């Protein structure tokens, strides 16, 4: 996009003052909305416009400059011409002289003005020209800036003389031209708003006697005339960038064209494409050595260098415009029969057209909006009036350009009203369950390129409800081929799709919409989470789903705030240098998540990934795929383009391994065990050195001192271990309790643990639900047995609950020594491992706490803040909790040290895991 270059823009000007004292009497000669805005701003600054000289009304409609001046009572003169056969028209010149102007201001003028008028006022005349003179003298300067591939665009305010754009320069400003910038973007984002300011500044410089007159150099001067339709034919033997510049430089007038199937077809909406050619149907183009490809995103064209560009819209000789992607389906467009409501809507729209096209007696189907005198500002007005009068119907400005004739426009509006313009409806074969006082509908197939499909070989596996061991659904088991399809879809969406071209604010809008849908469906999502993972429903509602919603909203807000920086460097004298950095998305990212917080872990990683502009392929844990697949459904409802989000249920050894090896994936984010993390890191390195972030195992120490608030420490210590059934990556894997309070702490913990209600996670009074799956329950029971065999004391729990499902009693092990297995290894379950330490032995307990290869989280309870901060400095963990635990927040970075992994989830730091930094140095 366009970017101003601050002080570099003003080549010939002095600093503008805040308050202007000197004022001039001005004659404005010109037309257009630009002229109108210059007029208004000059009036606002206190200058006196003594006359406006503009063009006659067109089709009974006054020019915007004339309308504004007439409304203010400023004298307005509408002359069709100023001279005949090279000689000034006497009565026109006399009319001009009658206003007594001290300076002529020509913001945009298409007429030839006699030199008697140009030189007549005390200060002469100044003109706005939309190029950096002496380059692109003459008409169509903005178009030629793009056609010739200039890296800089800009404008000049100069003193008029008897040449064509050759007068001395008063001031100039410039901006960068992006590879895909259009004439409209250059004009609307820079040349128009900055040009208005510059004209006002130029007038004041003259009034203050400070305006320079810098002679134009003839070195580098160019002159180009008005481009006409017959001269805009595309010459195909050029590189892709030259073709792109030719097409965008002629968009929208007069329009670059080529012959296709015997008729002139005009091309609009060009952008350059990177990567490999997308799939599509070939289209022969006269003169082109290689046929174009009609793809789902538009028409792909090829330069003689093999590189590509994408055309969004095509216009036929009869004026009809269509999306280029619909070229081969144009014959199928039929005339709609309107209902009574639609006929009434059409009448309302006709009245809107009539209000804008006041010069047209009757609006007929053949009435052309633009040929009847409408401008681009009228397009905005019409779209807003339709929205207001037609029940909030949302139309894009582009619809008017694609169907400028009233009859065709109504047909497109009705299709939009009926929803026929939308992509084919998503087909979902749900598994439905009546549970938790509702019917939950769960997708169970792979989600690839916006569609739910079976695995390629048709295989499925059972997703089990840990509450009773029953089968919830038979879920598709993704194959290596399915992974490849998903990655190809994600790559196509990034390289060629709408997502790759979407502006950041629109990306954020989609993410906000998705967060809203997650909140709207939170009860259904929490219910699925409860039956699929065993999460207690109330906890799932607040944390599993609630924090997922918060995460998407947080990162949605970051989308348009990702930015680089400018860096001062040594200049390469006598030249100067500007160095800046850009933050760019990586491309296709893979995300592999665990089973303890299925949706929340998805949100933590995918929200940052999407906010940065990447596309993703996500593999949920094999045992908990259902909320991820429901999330995929909601992403379609939110409007995410196809291929941006892909979800593959399946095994880690097959689908996960393929993701880590795939050459088109540029980043892999993984949460899981340390051994698997090591294998993933190895595969990522060997395959293509893809970027990796790992959140792995933990054995988080929690140190409780005798000066703590004991009841709070008991309550939060239990939460640190038993929260989410102990299936919590930052769970306190080992508690160190100071000797003088050790016994009382254990007594209170046991007392409170006995009060915990174990049961159905959908029961609102349940404290403790089932473990996630059978194999995990068996591992936990073995873990407890090992601890007892090694000498730990089992003071509570340690057994499976006698009921269907995978329930385990909350367990408390004491007298745990440093050498024991349970002191060193993570249980990932509801097992409290307690060791005591001598009173006052701060450094000793710190040494024991750090004597682990893990470093994910840690905690300390003490009233002595100095001691707490000392300990926080010494603990080797990515997170330290003081007098609290499990207090994570979407804005705070989360991640571990040592063999607990590297990289961060959440907070601003998480974005950088999914971005790359590019340094750019410019010499000027």
Image (tube, grey):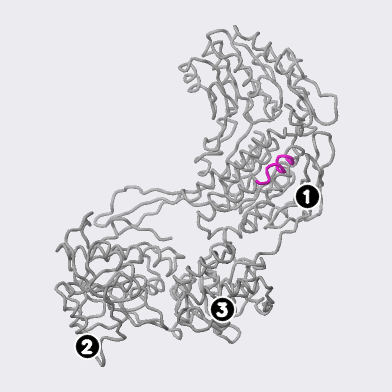
Q: Quadrant of residue 46?
A: bottom left
The residue that label 3 is drawn on is: 406
Mark nearer the N terminus (3 vs 2): 2
Residues tagged 2 and 1 counted as in contact (Cβ below 8 A): no
10 Å crowding of disc 3: few (<14), some (14-19), many (20+): many
**x and y, in percent, of residue 730 in the image:** 62, 29
Q: Nearer the viewer, mark 3 or mark 1?
A: 3
Within 10 angstroms of label 2, few (less than 14), some, or many (20 or more) residues? few
The label number, if any, that marks residue 401 in the structure image = none
SS under mark 1: strand
> What predominant SS class does the magenta segment belong to?
helix
Q: Nearer the viewer, residue 331 or 500?
A: 331
With 222 as the anchor, is 648 left or right in this view?
A: right
Tell me which residue sits at (31%, 72%) in the image.
69
State which tag comes first along the sequence, 2 or 1.
2
- In the image, the segment drawn in magenta is 520-528
Instruction: Tell me the distance, in whole angstroms, between the alpha carbons under discs 2 and 1.
Output: 85 Å
- Rendered view: 507 above or below 44: above
Residue 326 shows up from this direction? yes
Instruction: Report the residue marked by disc 2.
Output: 91
**Which residue in the structure is indicated by mark 1?**
476
Task: Give the residue at x 67% y 64%.
Answer: 423
């Amino acid at each position: 996009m366009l970017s101003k270059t601050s002080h570099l823009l003003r080549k010939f000007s002095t600093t503008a003052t805040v308050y202007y004292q000197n004022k001039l009497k001005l004659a404005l000669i010109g037309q257009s909305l630009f002229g109108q805005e210059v007029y208004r701003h000059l009036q606002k600054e206190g200058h006196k416009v003594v006359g406006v000289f503009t063009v006659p009304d067109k089709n009974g409609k006054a020019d915007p400059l004339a309308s504004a001046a007439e409304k203010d009572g400023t004298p307005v003169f509408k002359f069709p011409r100023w001279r005949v056969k090279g000689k000034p028209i006497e009565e026109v010149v006399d009319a001009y002289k009658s206003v007594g102007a001290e300076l002529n201001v020509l913001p945009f003028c298409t007429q030839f003005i006699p030199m008697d008028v140009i030189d007549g006022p005390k200060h002469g005349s100044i003109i706005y020209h939309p190029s950096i003179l002496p380059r692109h003298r003459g008409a169509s300067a903005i178009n030629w800036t793009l056609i010739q591939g200039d890296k800089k665009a800009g404008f000049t305010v100069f003193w008029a003389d008897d040449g064509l754009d050759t007068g001395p320069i008063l001031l100039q400003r410039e901006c960068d031209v992006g590879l895909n910038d259009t004439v409209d973007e250059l004009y609307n984002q820079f040349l128009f708003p900055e040009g208005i300011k510059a004209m006002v500044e130029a007038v004041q410089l003259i009034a203050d006697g400070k305006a320079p007159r810098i002679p134009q150099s003839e070195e580098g001067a160019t002159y180009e005339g008005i481009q006409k339709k017959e001269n805009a034919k595309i010459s195909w033997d050029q590189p892709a960038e030259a073709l792109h510049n030719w097409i965008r430089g002629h968009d929208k007038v007069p329009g670059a064209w080529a012959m296709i199937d015997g008729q002139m077809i005009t091309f609009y909406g060009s952008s350059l494409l990177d990567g490999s050619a997308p799939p599509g149907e070939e289209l022969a183009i006269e003169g082109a050595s290689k046929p174009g490809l009609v793809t789902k995103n538009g028409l792909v064209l090829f330069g003689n260098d093999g590189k590509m560009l994408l055309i969004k819209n095509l216009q036929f000789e009869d004026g009809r415009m269509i999306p280029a992607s619909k070229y081969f389906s144009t014959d199928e467009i039929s005339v709609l029969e309107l209902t009574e409501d639609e006929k009434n809507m059409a009448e309302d729209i006709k009245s809107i057209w009539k209000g804008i096209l006041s010069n047209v007696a009757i609006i007929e189907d053949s009435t052309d909006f633009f040929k009847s005198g409408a401008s681009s500002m009228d397009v905005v007005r019409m779209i807003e009036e339709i929205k207001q009068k037609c029940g909030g119907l949302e139309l894009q400005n582009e619809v008017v350009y694609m169907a400028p004739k009233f009859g065709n426009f109504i047909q497109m509006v009705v299709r939009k009203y009926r929803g026929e313009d939308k992509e084919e409806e998503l087909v979902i074969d749900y598994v439905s369950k009546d549970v938790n006082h509702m019917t939950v509908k769960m997708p169970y197939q792979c989600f690839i390129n916006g569609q739910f499909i079976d695995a390629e070989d048709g295989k499925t596996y059972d997703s089990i409800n840990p509450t009773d061991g029953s089968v919830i659904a038979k879920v598709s088991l993704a194959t290596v081929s399915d992974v490849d399809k998903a990655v190809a879809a994600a790559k196509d969406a990034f390289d060629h799709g709408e997502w790759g071209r979407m502006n950041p604010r629109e990306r954020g809008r989609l993410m906000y919409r998705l967060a809203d849908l997650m909140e709207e469906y939170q009860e259904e999502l929490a219910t699925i989470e409860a039956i699929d993972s065993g999460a207690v429903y109330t906890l799932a509602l607040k944390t599993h789903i609630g924090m997922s919603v918060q995460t998407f909203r947080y990162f949605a807000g970051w989308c348009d705030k990702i930015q680089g920086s400018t860096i001062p460097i040594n200049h390469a004298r006598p030249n100067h240098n500007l160095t800046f950095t850009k933050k760019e998305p990586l491309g296709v990212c893979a995300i592999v998540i665990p089973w303890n917080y299925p949706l929340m872990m998805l949100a933590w990683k995918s929200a940052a990934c999407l906010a940065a502009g990447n596309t993703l392929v996500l593999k949920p844990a094999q045992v908990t795929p259902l909320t991820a697949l429901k999330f995929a459904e909601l992403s379609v409802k939110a409007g995410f383009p196809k291929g941006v989000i892909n979800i593959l249920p399946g095994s880690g050894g097959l689908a996960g391994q393929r993701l880590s090896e795939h050459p088109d994936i540029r980043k892999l984010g993984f949460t899981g065990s340390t051994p698997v993390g090591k294998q993933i890191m190895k595969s990522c390195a060997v395959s293509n050195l893809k970027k990796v972030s790992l959140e792995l195992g933990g054995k988080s120490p929690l140190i409780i001192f005798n000066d703590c608030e004991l009841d709070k420490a008991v309550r939060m210590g239990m939460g640190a271990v038993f929260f989410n059934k102990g299936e919590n990556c930052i769970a306190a894997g080992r508690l160190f309790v100071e000797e003088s309070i050790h016994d009382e702490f254990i007594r209170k913990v046991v007392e409170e643990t006995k009060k915990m209600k174990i049961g159905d996670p959908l029961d609102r009074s349940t404290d403790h639900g089932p473990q996630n799956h059978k194999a995990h329950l068996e591992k936990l029971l073995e873990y407890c047995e090992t601890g007892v065999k090694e000498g730990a004391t089992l003071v509570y729990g340690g057994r499976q609950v006698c009921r269907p499902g995978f329930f385990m009693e909350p367990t408390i092990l004491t007298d745990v020594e440093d050498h024991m297995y349970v002191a060193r290894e993570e249980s990932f379950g509801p097992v409290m491992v307690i060791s005591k330490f001598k009173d006052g032995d701060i450094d000793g307990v710190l040494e024991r706490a750090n004597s682990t290869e893990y470093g994910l989280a840690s905690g300390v309870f003490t009233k002595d803040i100095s001691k707490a901060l000392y300990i926080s400095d010494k603990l080797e963990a990515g997170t330290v909790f003081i007098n609290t635990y499990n207090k994570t927040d979407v804005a705070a970075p989360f991640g571990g040290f040592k063999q607990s992994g590297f990289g961060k989830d959440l907070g601003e730091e998480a974005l950088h895991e999914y971005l790359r930094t590019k340094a750019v140095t410019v010499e000027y």
